[in-house]
Amino acid sequence: MMKDFSTTAPPLEVHDLTVAYDRRPVLYGIDLTVPAGSLTGIIGPNGAGKSTLLKAVLGLLPLSAGWVKIFGGPLAQNARRTGYVPQRESVDWDFPVNVMDVVLMGRYGHLPPGRRPGRADREIARACLDQVQMLPLARRQIGNLSGGQRQRVFLARALAQESDLYFMDEPFAGVDAATEAAIVDLLREMKARGKTVVVVHHDLSTARDYFDRLVLLNVRLVAAGPTAEVFTPELLQKTYGGRLTILSDVVQSLGEEP
Amino acid sequence: MVQPWTEDFMVSFWIVVMGFLVVATCGLVGTYLLLRRMALVGDAISHSILFGLVVAFMVFRSGGTMVMFVAAVATGLLTVGIIEFIHRQSRVKTDAAICIAFTTLFAAGVVLLSVAEVKGPVHLDAECVLYGEIAFVPLDPAVEVLGLVLGPAPVVRMAGVLVGLLVLATVFYKELLVTSFDPALAKSLGIRVGIWHYGLMAVLSIVIVSVFEAVGAILAVAMLVVPPMFAAQLSDRLPVRFALVFLHAALSSVLGYQLSVWLNCSPAGAMVVVGALLFLLAWAVTRPRRAAFPGWMAPN
């Protein structure tokens, strides 16, 4: 049986969050609550601040205003319960480590300073690699992986963190169809195990199928809620503004379906 | 041709040992610098350290190890602080900010040096600053511990720094690895990325000040960069790269010293030249393997 979350604090609560680069706000007055056990997609046009929202929530960027609570407290208190999958391009894939080394980094949050991952950590890492069908490549240098394989390594590393709340930055960007399907399966499995997952997503055509909740973002929060309620032509137009050409297919398909 | 080895064995021995220790120590810390794309910061600190040393000699009138280390760490952190301040407060890009910071501090060091005419237990003339003099190392008084003669003071100090560095790199392997590879993940794991950054800079400063006397400001940069580049050509695994740095240190110190005897030139300079040749050799040997997939047709 899943824990009763009704009495506990939500995994993520954001109030009046504002982030500015050079005094130009890229996120403005975001109020958001992500309920436990949900699979939430963050969508919005380029430059809407989707990745910035993740980074701000994780304390990787200074906030101009507002606050963030993770499980009702500051992130530092709950760092272990929070997993992060950065964009693939954010790291140097020529780095002299192999797949296993990278997945083991997911265990670092559980180890005190000066302690190296042990046998138990390796077992967990192996299981996580197996879950994304990457175990046979455990000893491969990360530079010799395809884009989809790299994404799977990052996901395995996140799984190894054994967190309750996950943030993923564009995990579907530039991956092959097999990897995309594998990620979707993985997300559903994580949800089934009571994990909360927040995913920055760029593909409107799949957003409705992949996520049970959506956050529509364009510098300001346009809407947030169950997918069925917020994935509407009106709200999407409000989010994407004049960029209707990209939208027309999606909006049309929405109109046709009941 | 092998005369120095047969005639003045101890002098040659200490020069080569010092060379090995210098290259290995610089190569170890340089490996992390390259992984963090901070080679230029090594260049910066190796120059700005002059300022700190001169100030320390003027204030304390001594060249003791502790004074040197404290001055080095202070100057190193000051340099990094200035670089970050310039970068943040203006539209100056990092590379330009680095150049502004270290050339200014180096120039201030040069000016102070001639103003104060520092003459202390450690001589610090302009030539020594630039090239160092590894050949003088064996002339330093030997260090004795419990009646055991260890060797010339700079060599013993250098060995101490290398051992300290090895201990730190082993104990904090995972913190250094994750903050170098994926600082964002490290931060989200609750690891204080800034502390590791400044810690590495402090260690780098201590390494640089320890090698300063022997090889000077410029050759120190070569020793920070060349051994890790050599290792990077030959291995994709970090622990193997560290081993290769030691191999590079052994080869370049012995062969470099031999070259300096043949050509009657500066041993430190010859060691760097040999080190660079070793890098070229490693690059040439592994090039065909890498060229199998030119960038535009590589998988994915």
Image (spheres, coloured by chain):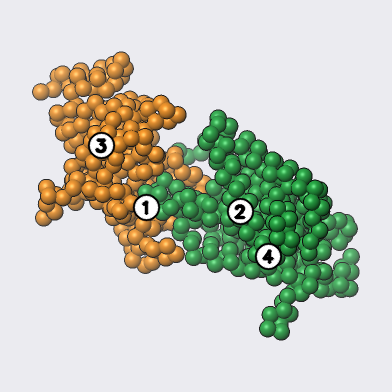
Q: Residue furthest bottom?
A: B147
Instruction: Measure the alpha-carbon separation of dots 4 and 2.
Output: 14 Å
Instruction: Measure the alpha-carbon separation of dots 4 and 3.
Output: 53 Å
Q: Colour of chain A?
A: orange
Few, some or many residues within 10 Å of mark 1 (<14, 14–19, 20+): many
Q: Nearer the viewer, residue A182 or A230?
A: A230
Determine whether label 2 and label 1 are within 8 Å by CB. Answer: no
Q: Nearer the viewer, residue A87 or B165?
A: B165
Q: Colour of chain B?
A: green
Res. B74 mark: 2
Which residue lies at the image location 33% right of the left edge and 30% below the top edge?
A27
Res. A15 mark: 3
Amino acid under disc 3: His
Residue designated by label 4: B65
Numbered disc 4: secondary structure: helix
Q: Position of residue B157 (x, y in %)?
A: 68, 68
Question: Which of marks 1 and 2 precedes in the sequence?
Answer: 2
Question: Which of marks 2 and 4 precedes in the sequence?
Answer: 4
Q: Is residue B116 above or below residue A65?
A: below
Q: Position of residue A59 (x, y in %)?
A: 36, 43
